[in-house]
Image: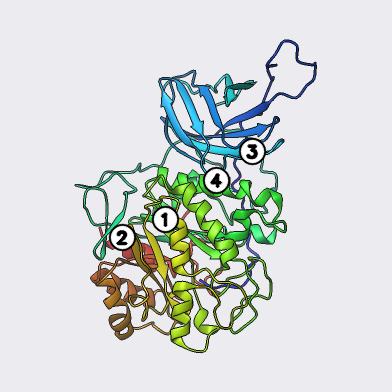
Amino acid sequence: MRRPTRTAALAVAAVSTAAAAAALLPTLGAAAAGAAPACAVSYSVTNQWDSGFQGNVVITNNAAPTTSWTLGFTFPGGQKVTQGWNAAWTQSGTAVTAASESYNGVIATGGTVSAGFLGSWSGSNPAPASFTLNGTICNVNGGGSATPPTTPPTTPPTTPPTTPPTTPPTTPPTTPPGGDTAPPKVHVSGNKLLDSTGKQVVLHGVNRSGTEFACAQGKGIFDGPVDDAAIDAITSWKGVTAVRVPLNEDCWEGLSYVPAADGGANYVAAITGWVNRLVAHGITPIVELHWTHGLYTGNSAGCTDVNATCQKPMPDAQYAIPFWTSVANTFKSNTSIVFDLFNEPYPDRATSTTDQAWACWKDGGTCPGINYEVAGMQDMLDAVRGTGAQNVVLMGGLAYSNDLTGWLAHEPADPTGNLAAAVHVYNFNSCANSSCWESQLAPVAAKVPLVAGEIGENTCGHSFVDSFMSWLDSHQVGYLGWTWNTWDCSSGPSLISGYDGTATAYGLGLKNHLASLG
């Protein structure tokens, strides 16, 4: 949704460090006293429940720059890595290896890189005693604890988040009859999303705003808590199976104006942790590009800033292509994660004809009325597929994703066939009645999977979304409500008044409707 800059109460869910690098072993007996070790590793358990945990490693390179790296350590308690990110994780017996990906193999002298994983444990969960980097001993971890620490985040939130639980979700991911364990591994077949067993997947859920704007405004990374308790509150709404995660291009890429604590590796690690927590709770994350770089001051401009401090009509190719290359590399190992290439395109407001707008939408380049080289949908899709990612990719249309009239005629070429359409519909949009839905949305839904990535109304009521959800159900189209944030619903669609899941009058429409689906 396009929205003005908000001053929202901030609750940062920071990744705490459970154990800092401790006593460092000299690699040679003749090493000079006090000489810096070749490398150091900080290992932390950022969350733990009855039989599982989430871990993180931060590697510091004190030697010559690397072109690739391999981290090695041994689990002393028989723990098992079940899933990982930012590295290729393997395990043989108790020995664990994490090898760099193509995008993070270089660690400059004095530089750091982080990687994370989900694991299982039984009995106890002690930290590894030592680590090696490319065969060189880095450090002995001096007491990493399996219990997350209570050290507060670097930037304290204005509204403290609730205490994270030490137990897993009250309702763990289930195995639907004849289908994948939640969240499903999704792919496209005709006009449907299917899981790996061939069962149809219809996504229902919520948007979780904050990660697109807070980091660019010096307000941390999240707007409100994103811990296990927060996810439990989301899943307490029966029928929620998906959460849309909006991203900020400049924060992901760590541009200089973004506070260091909120950008670059810190932002990537926080988003990766959030996405993987959603997966661990059986939720399908939809990762999408929301605020982008590029100077645009034309019709309907949201800001006059070149930085990603508002939504632009289309992404700037100079930044969007490396952004999607990095995001796809980060999440490509898990096809339960869906990509949404660009939140709400509006090149139709900048160009003089609809044909020009759709051409800009698909192919980018030099677009009339936009003063930077545009990344078209084909460009961004090519960047994703160039990494080998097979994830389902969503694409919204013109007019802030409300107009799909030219979507099928301008559908980009996808070698994997895993392409789907997205639409956003609010009561104040042009296409906001059943006759428009039948003439514009139904033909697209008959050809490719369609997901209503944002639905809502600005009345604090739910009569409009009730009507639209019924139409979507009849066409087997999934939908996600905007937004799971505790804002005033009289100033925009806000589903909740509390992060415990207390619904607003508007949010009750989505909550009750999903519950009625059984």
Mark 3 crowdedness (10 Å alpha carbons): few <14, some 14-19, many ≥20: many
Apparent side of residue 491 relative to residue 203 in the rendered image (left or right): right
In depth, the one of 384 and 431 nearer the eye is 384
Amino acid type, callout 1: Arg
Q: Earlier in the sequence, mark 1 or mark 3?
A: 3
Amino acid type, callout 3: Ile
Using the numbered discs, state the Cα–Cα distance from disc 1 to disc 3 in whole angstroms. 26 Å
Q: Does 159 sit above or below residue 457? A: above
Amino acid type, callout 4: Tyr
Q: Earlier in the sequence, mark 4 or mark 1?
A: 4
- Residue labelled with disc 1: 385
Amino acid type, callout 2: Gly
Q: Quadrant of the C terminus?
A: bottom left
Q: Earlier in the sequence, mark 2 or mark 4?
A: 4
Mark 4 crowdedness (10 Å alpha carbons): few <14, some 14-19, many ≥20: some
Instruction: Place residue 513 in its image quadrant.
Output: bottom left
Mark 1 crowdedness (10 Å alpha carbons): few <14, some 14-19, many ≥20: many
Percent x, y for residue 374?
A: 55, 71
Using the numbered discs, state the Cα–Cα distance from disc 2 to disc 4 in whole angstroms. 25 Å
In depth, the one of 411 and 18 nearer the eye is 411
Q: Does 364 sit above or below residue 212? A: below
- Residue labelled with disc 4: 103
Q: Earlier in the sequence, mark 2 or mark 3?
A: 3
- Residue labelled with disc 2: 417
Instruction: Place residue 452 in its image quadrant.
Output: bottom left
Do the residues bearing badges 2 and 4 touch, measured as CB atoms within 8 Å? no
Where disc 2 sits, the SS reads: loop
Residue at (66%, 60%) from the top-left corner?
A: 216
Residue 258 visible, this orientation? yes
